[in-house]
Structure formats: C-alpha cells, structure tokens
Amino acid sequence: MKVLQFKNVCLNYYSDKGETVALENVNFDVNEGEFVSIVGPSGCGKTTILSLISKLLTPTKGNILLNGVDITQINKDTKDNFIGYMFQKDQLFEWRTIFKNVTLGLEITHQNTQENIEYANTLLKKYGLWEFKDKHPHELSGGMRQRVALIRTLVLHPKIMLLDEAFSALDFQTRINVCDDIHTILKQENITSILVTHDITEAITMSDKIIVLSNRPAHVKNIHKMNFDKSLTPLKRRESENVSKYFDIIWKELNNEKQGI
Amino acid sequence: MKNKEFKPKYSDGYIKYIHAKNRRKAIILFLQIALLISIIGVWELLARFDVIDTFIMSCPSKIANRIVTLFATGNMLQHSLITLYEATLGFIIATVAGTMIAILLWSFENVRKVVEPYIIVLNSLPKIALGPILIIWVGVGTKAILAMDILIMIVITIISMLNAFISVDKDKIMLLKSMGANKWQILTKLILPHSIQEFVSVLKINVGLTWVGTIMGEYLVSKAGLGYLIVYGGQVFDMDLIMSSTIVLCILAALMYFVVAMIEKRILNKNKR
C-alpha cells in the first residue's frame, strides 16, 4: 500500500537574491513499512523534501499524497497523521529527564493518557533505556541519546519517520551501531521511514529503496531497489557483495551529476 | 555481627593531592582575611600617628564608633531599610518587567524589528541624563528613585533575555512544530527552560545594578536612605558619615548578592543540565 506519493512536486524559494527553483517535477512513491533513502549532491534539496512531507513548506506545484489524501487538506492537528522527525543532533531537552523527554510529544498533543504513558514505558523497557528513565540526557552515550530521540517520536505513532542526516553527528563506530539499532526498531514497529544522507553505504545497508536526486533544481534521477535478505540488519548487510555493486552504481551517478554529465 | 562500614581506599598520591588542594584553599582564605585586616590596621596606625588627616580620610575606629552610634539611635537602620526597600522593589520590578517585555518581543517578530534600534540607543544612553526628566514626570521621592533604578536595569534585562530566547536551536523549535506545538507551548516547554541560565545571570547583573540605580536616584531626589546620608555627609564634610554609610551599603549589597546566589543554586539544581 502506498503511504506517500510525490506527484510532479515543484518548489520555488523566494529571497532578496531572487527566485530559486529548488525542486522540479519530483515523482516517487513510498510503500507502507518501507525504508527509503534519498541521496544527491550537496544543496540539491534533500532536506526540502522532508520539510514538504512534514508540512513545514508547501509545494509551489504538484501534489503530495499521504494515504491517498492531499497533504495540504490534512489538518495539522490531526493526531492520526503525525509525521515524526529526527535531526542530525538528537535535540533532547537537557533540563528534562529521559522519561520527560520521551513523553514531550504526548504533553504537546495533550495525549498523556495512562495508555500512552504505558506505551512509552514499554518502549523504554524494550529498547534498554528503562534504568535510565530518571537520568538526564548528559548522563547517556551518543547512541542511547539517539534511541531516546527515536522513542520520543515513536510514542506518537508516526505514519512516517523522517531522518535528516540523523546519524552524521556520531563517531564512526557509534554510528554503525546506532544505524543498526534504529533500523531494527523501525522495522519491528513497522514504521515507514525516509532517510536523507550523504553516506552512500549507510543508505544502501539501511534501505529497501534509494532515490537519487539530480543537481538543483532537483528531480528524481533514478530509483534503486535494494536486494538484500530482509532478515539482515544493516551491519550484516555490510558483509554482502551487493553493497559494493550498489555503491559503484550510485557513486557513478552522483559523480556524473557533479560533473554535469 | 557488626556491619562493616564501607570505606573506599585511596592511594597515597590521591590523599596527598587532596591535602595539597585543601592547604592551598586555606592559605588563600587566610591571605584574603589578612589583606583586609592589614589595610584596616595600616589605616588605623597612620591615623593614630597623624600621618593622615582623619578629617579628610577618617579612620576605622571612628567609622566603627559612628556605625554603632547611628544604629543605636535607630537612624542608620531607618535609612538602610529605606534604601533596601527601594533597591529590592526596583530589582523585582525591572527583572520581571524586562523579562515580560523580552517575551513579548520574542512573540512578535515584527514588533521586535521596529523597536530594536530604540532599545540599542536606550542601552547606550547614560541613564543619569534622564534624571531631570524623571523628576518632572514622576515627581521627587521614592517614585523617581524607583524609576531611575528600573531604567538602569530594564534595558539590559530585555536585551539579555531576548538574546537568550532567540539563540535557541532552530531544530528544537522545528521538532516542537513537527509535533504540532503552538507558540505558547514552544515558549513554556522550550524557550523559557532553555533560558534559565541566562535568567540567573541577569539576576546577578541586576543585583549589582539595583544598588547603582537606587543610590543614583537618592543622590538626585531623596530625603532619606543611604544615598542621602552619603550626599549629606559630603555637603557637611562629615567623612565618618560617608564611610559608615558606604560600609553599610557594601554589607547590604553583599547580603543581597548572597540571597541571589542561593536562589541560583536552587534554580540550577532544579534544572540540572
């Protein structure tokens, strides 16, 4: 089932310097439970796509459909269509305990019912953070903090999870472990996810599908389906021969784009 | 069987390090006290041996006597309480009003852009220059003193708090927006708690400025208070009175700073980062 559809989406920016065409006829679909990565040259408009999905921007032309309904027609306050967002930094509130960070969204949306609090507790237990629930973020490691950031979003039952360079602030070893963790959690909870990244290997090992964007104004240059055993985690996928094969193809595409070929 | 108490074992090197650290602390405290006693002692000796003129320089024993006499007659207490009342009230009004204005300016970006240049000009203006205007507008007496005091603190409070509000990470705001937060929720869940450290800094700045404002106000218009005593002492060339009032002022300012430091400790403990 198609959860998200981009249909000829265009976006123009206006500033003192004039008008910039950021996206031009962007078309792609995302199916339920799918993990999709978006890669492309720097500044091509990858994060712009996430801003459009989370309704922080409105398309100049074209339609974005969420479960078949135009996103502009969906009331922002509708709790059933929550779009989760994970940033480069975990953006935890340092003055709140881990539990208070996790339940932040429930407070904002006035959903802190017994049932939802129980769900938050279940997620904290399930993903090894229960003992830390009364600690403050500075007492946790980088990987644990990212897990807290993810659970903070999961308690709101997101329809789609957007990950904007969500792992790039971590050191290499932590990053690989966190990718593994987050991927496992998202798959277990069957959350449709879209990752924006510069790291091709990360995209290959985490995704079911990779969307390659062109230079600005961005359009979809290619869409690659990843052929891995579904039971493999990103860390295990790194051992597969397919990784280098996909890497070569996507690397060449991005390089050609950089050179304007 | 008797429960054995847990005693952590430390290495000799660590014990030596702790001892050296404590010794250094004690030496610094001793030197601080010794410096004060030496200054007072030398001053007293110079006065006793007529090296300095006590009419112009006064001396510690005369100042101490004067403070005791003034407190015994109730004069010093009355003047101190008046100044303390003005300084405390001005401090509270300026801090609360300045923070409220900063919240309004954060909430309405266009208003902020309109008033920003005026705030900058007001900040660089020596507030004492507005003294005569304040006297004409609010009259002489406590009102004018409070107005001067508030004027000195409010602009810096607005600027500091506003800077703290707008320095909040944009992604944190975006996170709350993605959850559907409204402006009030962004303010109460993020902006205010994020700015608590800056608020404590403002409290510490204002606790110093409020005495400047109050004394300046009392110089201009008052008929009572420590500022009045100092001005009066100057007019009648009573150096002991000037020095006594200044010392009481120092003690009151230090006490107020101590109270604010206690508040800071409580606030920061509550908002562990």
Image (spheres, rainbow, N blue to C red):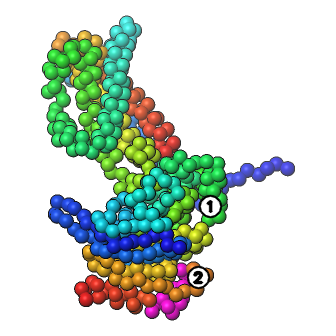
Whether residue B148 appears in magenta in the rendering, the answer is no
As drawn, the label of residue A230 is 2
Amino acid at pointer 2: Lys
- Which residue is at the front of the view, B49 or A190? A190
Amino acid at pointer 1: Leu
Establish whether labels 2 and 1 are both on one chain: yes
- Which residue is at the front of the view, A255 or A62? A62
Q: How many marks?
A: 2
Dot 2 lies on which element? Answer: loop
Neighbours of disc 1 within 10 Å: few (<14), some (14-19), many (20+):
many
Image coordinates for residue A135, horizontal then vertical, percent: 57, 53
**Mark 2 or mark 1: which comes first in sequence?**
1
Image coordinates for residue B35, horizontal then vertical, percent: 35, 35
Dot 1 lies on which element? Answer: helix
Residue A246 visible in this rendered orientation of the protein: yes
Instruction: State the image quarter where residue A59 is shown.
Output: bottom left
Q: Is residue A142 above or below residue A77?
A: below
* Chain hosting mark 1: A
- Which residue is at the front of the view, A101 or A44? A44
Q: For the residues marked 2 and 1, what is the alpha-carbon distance in whole angstroms?
A: 23 Å
Whether residue A244 appears in magenta in the rendering, the answer is yes
Q: Residue furthest top?
A: B73
Image coordinates for residue A226, horizontal then vertical, percent: 49, 85
Left or right for A168, reference B205: right
As drawn, the label of residue B2 is none
Residue beneath the point at 38% across and 40% down: B199
Q: Which residue is mark 1?
A: A123
Residue beneath the point at 31% across and 43% down: B106
Residue beneath the point at 49% across and 69% down: A3
Q: Magenta stretch?
A: A234-245
* Chain hosting mark 2: A
